[in-house]
Image (spheres, helix red, strand yellow):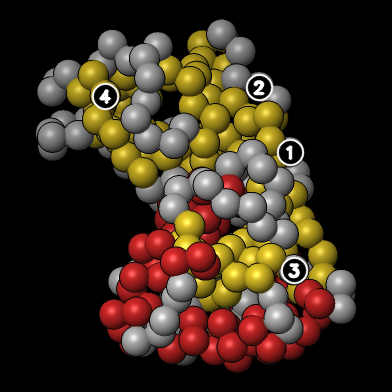
Amino acid sequence: MKFAIIGNIYQSEKSLHAEHLLGLLHHYKAKILVEKAFADFLEHEQHLSIPSSERFEGKTFEADMVISLGGDGTFLTAASIVGSRNIPILGINTGRLGFLADILPEDMDVTIDEIYANHYKVEERAVLQVITNYQLSIHPYALNEVAILKHDSSSMISIKAYINREHLNTYQADGLIIATPTGSTGYSLSVGGPVIAPQSKTMVITPVAPHSLNCRPLVVRDDWEITLEVESRSHNFLVAVDGRSESCNEQTRLRISRAPYSVKLVKRFDHQYFNTLRSKMMWGADAR
């Protein structure tokens, strides 16, 4: 098999996991590619020698599987690099919570063994696309969420939201989040949004610090289109797509809908989503 490895370059104390992973893959005589920035990081931090023939930059690579080594942020980066090419992504968690990257470093050995035994499963997750009346410089596809946020001002912004061209609401708030089921356990959850099961074919609209106490998150079908128009005292606002952000002026009109492709997540065969929820969110734990 041929693996492309994308890693977190801000965790020098955890780069030892990369050395172990490379050793496992070399044991199976796998073909290995390492993203150039991560390869440079490993050479500096771990003094590993990564030949130039085993490096890649951007999206110019071919692989049977991508391995994300880091937290969920690294996984989102890997998803943006893979894009629509249908390469499955395995997330090894050296970060914190880890909903997307949920393989613990101590489980790497058995996980790689299971992959070579073809004893794993692949889950498809919906992606959102953002279309604007001008060209965004950031990657306009989100596995987690698209967030519209106030920028350069302490004042609220006004966000007119339409669903399939029908007016839904005008939100007076610090921002508005449009999240996939995958992203429902991320930013949306932190501001009061619901947890949504991954295969539910929905998306959730969650306001950030709304001025009205009656304003609540709304779950809608993911084959609907959401259109947003923003007004701001500073005449600009921030668009954040899976953490990649860009400043826009208030003439920008955004259309958000389901993308024509999905992201494939590699999971261990016995992985259960609700087990992950209970363990990561400590449901039922007595905090006393």
Of tags 4 and 1, the one toward the viewer is: 4
Observer-side mark, 2 or 3, equals 3
Which residue is depicted at the point 69% across and 75% down?
A: 30
Query: Quick one: label 4, few (<14), some, or many (20+) residues within 10 Å?
Result: some
Query: Which residue corresponds to the image point at 68% horizontal and 61% vertical from the top-left?
Result: 65
Q: Residue 235's x, y, as percent?
A: 17, 18
Give the structural element (helix, strand or loop) at label 2. Answer: loop
Among numbered discs 3 and 4, the one appearing first in the sequence = 3
The residue singled out by tag 3 in the image is 1
Which SS class for mark 3? loop
Quadrant of image for the N terminus: bottom right
User: Which residue is disc 4 drawn over?
Assistant: 248
Looking at the picture, how far across and down is residue 103, in whole percent?
Answer: 62, 77
Query: Mark 1 packing: few (<14 Cα in 10 Å), some, or many (20+)?
Result: some
Query: In the image, 259: left or right of 70?
Result: right
When the figure is inspected, residue 278 is found, relative to residue 197, above or below; the finding is below
Say what amino acid the circle numbered 2 marks: Trp
* Of residues 263 and 281, the one drawn nearer to the viewer in this rendering: 263
Q: Which mark is residue 224?
A: 2
Going by the numbered disc 1, the residue's amino acid type is: Lys
Specify which label sits upstream in the sequence, 4 or 1.
Answer: 1
Query: Decide: marks 3, 4 in contact (CB < 8 A)?
Result: no
Q: Circle 1 is placed at which residue position?
A: 201
Marks 1, 3: nearer the viewer: 3
Q: Position of residue 264 (x, y in %)?
A: 70, 52
Please report whichever mark, 2 or 3, sits nearer to the chain's N-terminal start. 3
